Amino acid sequence: EIVMTQSPATLSVSPGDRATLSCRASQSVASNLAWYQQKPGQAPRLLIYGASTRATGIPARFSGSGSGTEFTVTISSLQSEDSAVYYCQQYNNWPTFGQGTKVEIK
Amino acid sequence: QVQLQQSGPGLVKPSQTLSLTCAISGDSVSSNSAAWNWIRRSPSRGLEWLGKTFFRSKWYNDYAVAVKSRITINPDTSKNQFSLQLNSVTPEDTAVYYCAREGSDRYYYYMDVWGKGTTVTVSS
């Protein structure tokens, strides 16, 4: 099983600042990496797939990068509605998820 | 617009079978380009993929190793839905269960439509 490790566990960011979230895979997943946003009481929402392609309707302030074992998602200018838990997920074989990074508004 | 509507009991007794259903609107369970997944989230294990069913000229299933001996995911083409059955549940199976559509763009796969989630508690 490919283990996904996210850091940090919690990120506190002021509105308008940049937020950078990291995800590491225990072995190479090429670019088979997706990011999801989950708010309390809601289902996860697809943000990024193929490591860097924004899903339909996702604002341009969200961007993804990386390949192999190291990945990041960046929120260029944090908005209050971006407060959520963010998960990475690999799909090189059976899907596995990271444990999540909670983004808080400072 | 594709939507997934989940249904099923929120409380299951230990050793019994957890059964959930996911009704699809705006797409077909028999689609040749989608797969239909069950995923759960618990405080101890985070998000955990359980398995999927999909149609590519015939029906296929893939299951997570951790639950392979206890899980069945079945399509129901007459009702355009799919179901999850998890046998011999224990309190460790307490979680929020989600159904999700897996799509792809020829190169990459992703879960692009999710149900709202069903909180299932395993307790006597």
Image (cartoon, rainbow, N blue to C red):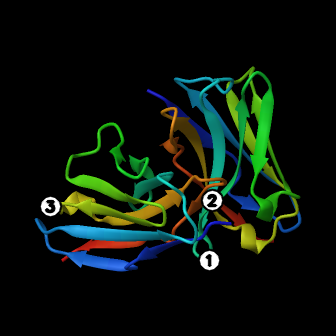
Mark 1: which amino acid?
Ser
Q: Given the image, what chain letter belongs to the residue carrying mark 2?
A: B
Q: Quadrant of residue A84?
A: bottom left
* Rendered location of residue B97, percent (x, y): 63, 55
Q: CA distance from mark 3 to mark 1?
A: 32 Å
In the rendered view, does A68 fall on the left or right side of B96?
left
Please tell me which residue lies in front, A28 or A55: A28
Q: CA distance from mark 1 to mark 2?
A: 11 Å
* Residue under pointer 1: B44
Query: Share a chain, discs 3 and 1?
Result: no
Q: Given the image, what chain letter belongs to the residue carrying mark 1?
A: B
Q: Secondary structure at mark 3?
A: loop
* Rendered location of residue B34, percent (x, y): 60, 31
Q: Are marks 3 and 1 in contact (CB under 8 Å)?
A: no
Please tell me which residue lies in front, B40 or B7: B40
Q: Quadrant of residue B36?
A: top right
* Residue under pointer 3: A77
* Residue under pointer 2: B40
Mark 3: which amino acid?
Ser
Q: Residues within 10 Å of mark 2 (few under 14, many from 20)?
A: many
Front disc: 2 or 3 = 3
* Rendered location of residue B78, percent (x, y): 75, 20
